[in-house]
Image (cartoon, helix red, strand yellow):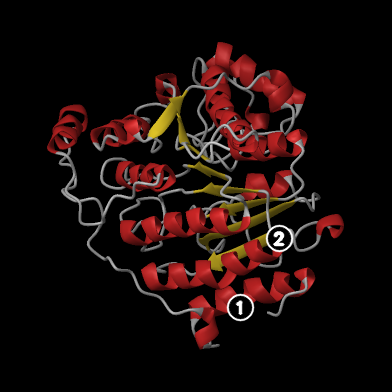
Amino acid sequence: MSGRAQLMWDEAVTGYDFGPDHPMDPVRLALTRRLVDAFGLDREVEVVSAKPAGDSTLRLVHREDYIEAVKAASADPRGADGAYGLGTMDDPAFAGMHEVSALIAGQSVGAAEAVWRGEALHAVNFAGGLHHAMPGGASGFCIYNDASLAIARLLELGAERVVYVDVDVHHGDGVQAAFWEDPRVLTVSLHEHPRTLFPQTGWPEETGAASAEGSAVNVALPAGTGDAGWLRAFHSVVPELVADFRPQVLVTQHGADTHFEDPLAHLAVSLDAQRAVQVACHELAHEYAEGRWVALGGGGYAVVDVVPRSWTHLVAVAAGREIAPETVVPEGWRQEVFARTRQLAPARMTDGRWPVSWKGWESGYDPADRLDQAVLAARRAVFPLRGLLA
């Protein structure tokens, strides 16, 4: 197996553009790519452009009638069929929508193929992580569910155990739905509580179908959760489950919208903590999956201040050349940010909260603490189903 990491990238993915007033501004992808380059990470990874996902690949997850509806809306956005979630405020139709969505999906599928076949140890597609798309409909800024497609392709290639860990602020509902009945896939989502955030799913009681009980895990975090609580929740649930499941591949989704500056959610996590979870996922892949790691982007709507730095750290971690938290952001990139957005770019690579600290679950818990209640609810719902102590 090659020890080299792959970065999946095609400039055309920046065409995933819902319009000037939509929060998912594709400039976040372009600026991430430029920051990766500014740090010279191109020399540490193999930059690869995979082909778009074809219809047969898309049908691994999505219904044929939905794919045809996306194609129709792509050709004539004004005729988008709202019954499929297309042409809505969240998912406006735009010309070329099918083509660019299939391209993004193709990058994640290509990442999965490269890792499974041993062409790369790690592969990153920060344009991916579009985890809300359902088999028969668009949802939450997501047209095709590239994360689910990557996992489905791994299963098609012969994988028998895949763990999917989603740390986006929103519940990874589309991926959970895709594998609800499949015991070969363990989906773990840490997200803001469904009482206070879209998509209003991801309750701890959602644990998988009868045929796959304990294959879905949901840690529903109270609004306002910061670094210590977020890291405590992650480390109190994820490592033990990964160790028990022993996946052949670890697929992770790193939405940057847990950040305290994100305008669409209510957690209070820093870049320092996001980086710490990226490092932890890398370590879990090496400890339990022979290093096989597919890392995806996701949400994130502080498109200048947060997203590019968070995902550049992700690429650096995958490349084996971590960027120190106190590192100064390259001046050339800051100038490009101002030229493109008329916004001032951040000066350093994290929020200055390093080293981040948190208490492990083994130290005991407080039944009156809302964060501990969330962790305990997830553990009690799933751990006994998997033969683990809650």
Of tags 2 and 1, the one toward the viewer is: 2
Residue 360 placement, left or right of 40: right
In the image, residue 158 lies at what x, y percent? 77, 38
Q: Which mark is residue 376?
A: 1
Q: Is residue 143 left or right of residue 160?
A: left
Residue lying at the far right in this picture: please name it.
211
Q: Is residue 177 above or below residue 203?
A: above
Q: Earlier in the sequence, mark 2 or mark 1?
A: 2
Query: Is residue 235 shown above or below 42?
Result: below
The quadrant of the rendering that contains the C terminus is bottom right
**Can residue 116 be seen here?**
yes
Crowding near the residue tagged with mark 2, few <14, some 14–19, many ≥20 C-alpha atoms within 10 Å: some
Residue 310 coordinates in the image, percent (x, y): 35, 48
Percent x, y of residue 234: 51, 66
Q: Nearer the viewer, residue 160 or 311?
A: 160
Give the quarter of the image for residue 331. top left
Q: Which mark is residue 156?
A: none
The residue under the point 58% across, 64% down is 238
Quadrant of residue 47 within the rendered picture: top left
Does 185 appear above or below 78? below
Q: Tell me, yes or no, if residue 201 can be seen here.
A: no
Is residue 184 or residue 97 the one in the foreground?
184
Residue 317 locus on image (x, y percent): 40, 48
Residue at numbered disc 2: 245
- Front residue of this view, candidates 169 and 43: 43
Q: Where, quadrant-wise, is the N terminus in this rendering? A: top right
| Cα–Cα gap, marks 2 and 1 | 20 Å
